Amino acid sequence: MYNLSLIDELMKTIHSMDGVQNKTEVISGVVNKFNLVKDRSVFYCKDFAIRFSQAQRENFSNTVLSLSALQKYDDKPFFVCLVMPKANRIFLANTSFLSKISHSSQQLREDNIKGSFNGGDIMRDIGKYKNEEQDFENLFLLHEGVTFEENLTRLVESTNQIVGRDLRYKNTPDGDNTILDSPQRAINFINSDKYYDLSADLSSRVKSVENEIVIASLIDNVNLRGRIIEYLVTHGEGDGIRKQIMQALKSNTQIPNLRTDDDLGDYNKEYDLFNTKTDIKTKVLYFNSAPKAYNIDKLLDFLSKDKSIYMIYFIGIDSSDEIVTFLCSMFDHTLLNGTAIQFHWAGRNSRGVSQLTGNVINEVLAKNKNDINKEESINWVKKLLNL
């Protein structure tokens, strides 16, 4: 969660010491004002962590921090403050904003977190955003939608020049034509009784665990919160995990490890004429968020199959702990306008991922109606195919 007022105050405090040129003095001023705890070279509190460096210019090559140390703080804004002769510069340096790992990283693997990043490994441009103070909140919202494990996979590939598994959708005439037909299939589905059956099925599942969903909504970690609610909604009592989750939530004890499939959808259901995959997205409505939506190649591969229907089921929790839900087509006009393509998390054999931006989830839940513009939707899948 991004504490805007506190972090704005942090920025002002750091800039009040522009030109001091003494890293120790800057550290002392920040630590004393915000009562930060020291962990080796990192200073932290509940809402952020920060590392201080000193250099003559903004493009600095100093070693900043080990990846294993960064992992401890990756669920909160992690800043690097660069003390320079005339001014202090601040960067957001969570794993989502690293291009690679530079120092002693030869043994870096997904099961062996090794190496450190340098100042030059911190990205300055991330999509439409700059790694600058006016964009920090939006950048961190994007980061919250990506897990450490996903960033680790990307960093291993970019650091060691490993060519990842080729999961890219392979264009074929038949597959592409089926994809281009997917907006019409979506229109047919939302106008059928099968849409209402799927919506009622999911609503019933939410109703059965609504108290636990409200409790889970208090979890600050966006990814963990989403995984827990997804699991509560989609899994029955057979494996015993759902009961353990409920007990842990109610007693505020450690939550059991959750193994969620890395599938396009969280809940799959087949009908005679439709094969549906539904992704479940949760949103605490009074907080900003920008969750990752779908892997584009996985989506295209699915949409290239006959009868394929991709939906997103939104679960919103408002300030009164009321739960609102809506089963939304990926082609809904409001949703499409709030869907962006992110390339910097993509491997070399990937078209990238989509990200839900702004306040689009709140808008979709408030509208509570699917509105598909067929021509607009066809243009969207054409755009994805041509990436």
Image (cartoon, helix red, strand yellow):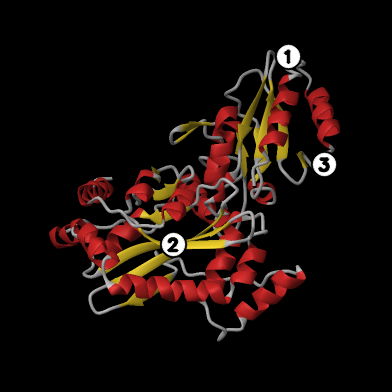
Residue at (40% x, 43% y) in the render: 343
Q: Residue at coordinates 80% horizontally, 42% vertically from top-left?
A: 40
Mark 1 and mark 2: Cα distance apart in space: 53 Å
Question: Residue 330 placed where, x, y %?
Answer: 34, 56
Q: Which mark is residue 348?
A: none
Report if residue 166 is visible in the image.
no
Q: Quadrant of residue 80?
A: top right
Amino acid type assigned to the residue bearing label 3 in the image: Lys
Residue at disc 1, secondary structure: loop
Residue 38 image label: 3
Q: How many angstroms separate mark 1 from mark 3 (CA)?
A: 24 Å
| Callout 3 crowding tier (Cα within 10 Å): few <14, some 14–19, many ≥20 | few
Residue shown at 52% from the left, 30% from the top: 124
Instruction: Check disc 2 and give the amino acid type.
Output: Phe
Viewer can see residue 212: yes
Point out which mark residue 19 bears: 1
Relative side of 355 to 107, left or right = left
Label 2 belongs to which residue?
A: 326
Question: What residue is at 23 percent from the left and 67 percent from the top?
Answer: 305
Closer-to-camera residue (246/298) = 246
Inspect the image, locate mark 1, and give the three-letter code of the amino acid beneath it: Gly
Regarding mark 2 in the picture, which secondary structure is present there?
A: strand
- Secondary structure category for the residue under label 3: strand
